[in-house]
Image: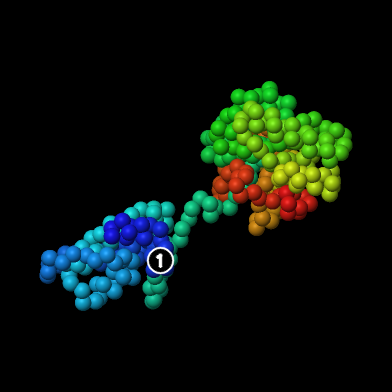
Amino acid sequence: MVILLIFFILKCEHPAVRSVTQLNLHQELNRNNSFLQTPLLSPKKTADSKVYTVQNIQEFQEGSEDAFLKKTMIVKFNLALKNKLQQYQQVKVLPKPQGKEQPKPQIKVQPLAGKPIVYLTFDDGPNHELNQILDILKQKKAKGTFFLIESQIWHYQDAVKRLVREGNYPGLHSVTHNKNKVYSSPANFINEMEQTRKTLLKVTGVDSKLIRAPYGSKPYMTDAFRNIVAQHGMKLWDWNIDTIDWKYQSSNPNQIVVNAINGFGRVNKKGPIIILMHVSKGTASVLPQIIDYFYSRGYQCPAYNPQRPVMMNFWNDTRL
Ligand SMILES: [Zn+2]
């Protein structure tokens, strides 16, 4: 019976149980515990095989059943309630509003998943600066999505392995990065991406299907290019905040921060926010400030999640 009861509570199959909140669980426990303080009336009866939900127990307390039976059930039920309460550790109880009437306090669940997201993306790696970028991401508890060039994956294998090990996501960014070559035909484009995919797979064991077209998908990625990308089951990511970091690397890295903030001001906050940066020294020097800015606005910075792909391409092609 107890196993059945606990199973029932934890699975939350019953509507009465499903609606249980942290608050009424506490109330339930308090009420049950105070009932348990009263003297036993008839200690010889045992519990039957009925499964008790919160609602059942309430009816039970108000009914004419035997006190010992009630207590047996409630002691067991309280164990299940305590288990359930442990699942509410992330729940925050909001303070009661001031006023004549005191409405029931509202319960608000605030999981990490509820925070809005900015995806930090870094192109043209791996290279000498990758480890510095990874150090900052680790220190700031942020993740990056990196679009990698095939030949450089071979040259910086340890850094790419670290990138993956630390929870960042590796994407594909072509072999040549030469617009006259990579866009010479749809077949050539997809061959470059497939070659990069296979190299990454060999080095890291990650089979990535996320690509970024060199210089962005407009104007190069016309229908024929996008069709072949879709046929290969790949996703194409552009961006909606451009830091133009390549331009300000050495002359004025602070401008990269300004561009990120200005871009954030203009971007549609309802859609995904993807910020374009590069694996380079100037960007690394201001990356902490950029991450701090997004944190201060209540955002989190996770990596691309292939389990829950997000669409972000300049063509609004929903296949990609
Ligand atoms: Zn690039």
The residue where tag 1 is placed is 14
- Residue 295: % across, % down: 56, 46
| Residue under the point 33% across and 63% down | 25
Q: On the rendered image, what quadrant is the N terminus found in?
A: bottom left
Q: Which residue: 66% across, 38% down? A: 208
**Residue ranking furthest to the top:** 155
Q: Please say if 89 is above or below 234.
A: below
Residue 116's x, y, as percent? 58, 52
**Depicted 253 relative to depicted 228: above or below:** above
Q: Position of residue 89 (x, y in %)?
A: 39, 53
Indicate the quadrant where residue 136 lies: top right
Side of 195 relative to 299 (left or right):
right
Q: Which residue is located at x 64 percent, y 25 percent?
A: 157
Residue count near mark 1 (Cα–Cα under 10 Å), binned few <14, some 14–19, many ≥20 = few
Question: Residue 32: in sight, yes or no?
Answer: no
Quarter of the image for residue 140 reads top right
The residue at the point 40 percent across, 58 percent down is: 11
Query: Residue flagged by tag 1: what amino acid is it?
Result: His
Picture quadrant of residue 151:
top right
Left/right placement of residue 18 relative to residue 226 reads left
Secondary structure, mark 1, is loop
